[in-house]
């Protein structure tokens, strides 16, 4: 099955590479698409594609190149039975509103977006320290499902600093597989409802685990403690928006670009991200948790 992967200004080459590898590992054939391909169409897109992935990077260039006809074509593709997977920047992009780095004079973005698969607001970064220049804001974060008991452990969050997370989180390999799945995070969002019916056709697949850290988002988060991954029906198709990076595994980390703390955590928890990926692709195929 052919799946389009957006690959144009704003996308992170690393995120595109990890997305392509993940799709291939699950039996899909990735097709790299430019903004021009989406606006004008190609021999393969949209007619021959099953889905479309917007990977991590920067969402503003996505909007600049695709607003109007490009976004209309994406929306029509999904409404007619295709699926959309937005990861990090792609998750922001698939929401109706963005609130990024609020209060930061150089990084703040408050804007509307046209796709609006989620009719609420993508708010981020969910965890602190994000930088466009390096990976100092990367974390390995724990997720829970809305149906599970919140896990209390010492590994809710592992960050890239020398001293770990604000709560003194540490990697505990012995208890790794008795806790929630842990996945890579760098600048992603949580999904906030704004007091209307925005969850009427939306399922919270995964929430950030906030049992043992002091960064619980404001009230109103989809699912109560900050939705990390959400899925929704859009016409005859489906969309999943993710604030985290389940497509990135331990083997994808460059030794020179990531902290030892993050690499250790990713190695310990690497197999767990497959649980999150399974739930995402099951939902996109028409299932649910």
Image (cartoon, rainbow, N blue to C red):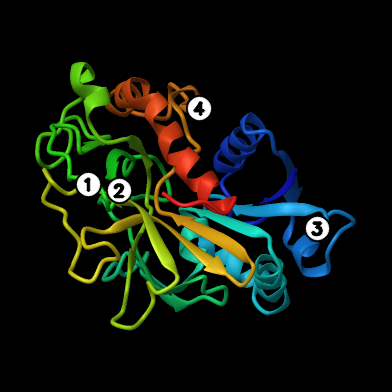
Callout 3: helix, strand or loop?
Answer: loop
Looking at the picture, how far across and down is residue 46, in whole percent? 79, 61
User: What's the mark number on residue 45?
Assistant: 3
Q: Is residue 235 visible?
A: yes
Mark number, residue 252 = 4
Q: Characterize the local packing of mark 2: few (<14), some (14-19) or many (20 or more) Cα atoms within 10 angstroms.
A: many
Query: Which SS class for mark 2?
Result: loop
The mark tally for this picture is: 4
Residue drawn at 57 percent across, 70 percent down: 234
Identify the residue under disc 2: 145
Q: Residues within 10 Å of mark 4 (few under 14, many from 20)?
A: some
Nearer the observer, disc 3 or disc 2?
2
Name which of mark 4 and mark 3 comes first in the sequence: 3
Asked if the residues shown at circle 1 and circle 2 are in contact, with their CB atoms under 8 angstroms apart, the answer is no
Mark 1 or 3, nearer chain start: 3
Q: Quadrant of the N terminus?
A: top right
Whether residue 246 is visible: no
Residue at x-position 27% and y-position 45%: 144
Q: CA distance from mark 3 to mark 2?
A: 34 Å
Which residue, given by chain and number where applicable, does mark 1 sit on? Answer: 209
Q: Secondary structure at mark 4?
A: helix
Question: Which mark is first along the chain, 4 or 1?
Answer: 1
Q: Earlier in the sequence, mark 1 or mark 2?
A: 2
* Residue 253, percent from left and from top: 46, 27
Comes first in the chain, label 3 or label 2: 3
Nearest the eye: 63 or 220 = 220
Q: Is residue 113 left or right of residue 109?
A: right
Q: CA distance from mark 4 to mark 2?
A: 26 Å
Q: Nearer the viewer, residue 84 or 187?
A: 84
Label 1: few (<14), some or many (≥20) within 10 Å?
many
Badges 1 and 4: C-beta atoms under 8 Å apart?
no
């Amino acid at each position: 099955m052919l799946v389009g992967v957006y690959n144009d200004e704003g996308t992170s080459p690393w995120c595109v590479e990890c997305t392509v590898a993940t799709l291939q590992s699950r039996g899909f054939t990735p097709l790299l698409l430019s903004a021009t391909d989406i606006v004008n169409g190609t021999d393969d897109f949209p007619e021959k594609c099953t889905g479309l992935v917007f990977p991590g990077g920067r969402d503003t260039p996505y909007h600049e190149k695709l607003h109007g006809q490009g976004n209309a074509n994406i929306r029509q593709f999904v409404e007619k039975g295709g699926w959309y997977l937005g990861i990090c920047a792609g998750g922001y992009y698939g929401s109706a509103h963005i609130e990024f780095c609020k209060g930061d004079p150089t990084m703040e973005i408050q804007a509307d977006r046209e796709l609006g698969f989620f009719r609420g607001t993508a708010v981020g970064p969910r965890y602190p320290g994000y930088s466009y220049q390096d990976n100092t804001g990367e974390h390995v974060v724990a997720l829970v499902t809305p149906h599970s008991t919140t896990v209390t452990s010492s590994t809710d969050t592992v960050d890239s600093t020398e001293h770990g997370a604000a709560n003194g989180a540490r990697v505990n390999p012995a208890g790794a597989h008795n806790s929630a799945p842990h996945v890579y995070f760098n600048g992603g969002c949580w999904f906030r409802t704004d007091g209307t019916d925005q969850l009427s056709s939306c399922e919270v697949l995964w929430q950030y685990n906030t049992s043992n850290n002091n960064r619980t988002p404001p009230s109103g988060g989809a699912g109560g403690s900050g939705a990390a991954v959400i899925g929704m029906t859009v016409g005859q198709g489906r969309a999943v928006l993710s604030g985290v990076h389940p497509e990135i595994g331990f083997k994808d980390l460059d030794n020179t670009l990531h902290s030892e703390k993050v690499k250790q955590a990713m190695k310990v928890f690497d197999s767990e991200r497959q649980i999150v990926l399974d739930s995402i692709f099951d939902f996109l195929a028409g299932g649910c948790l």
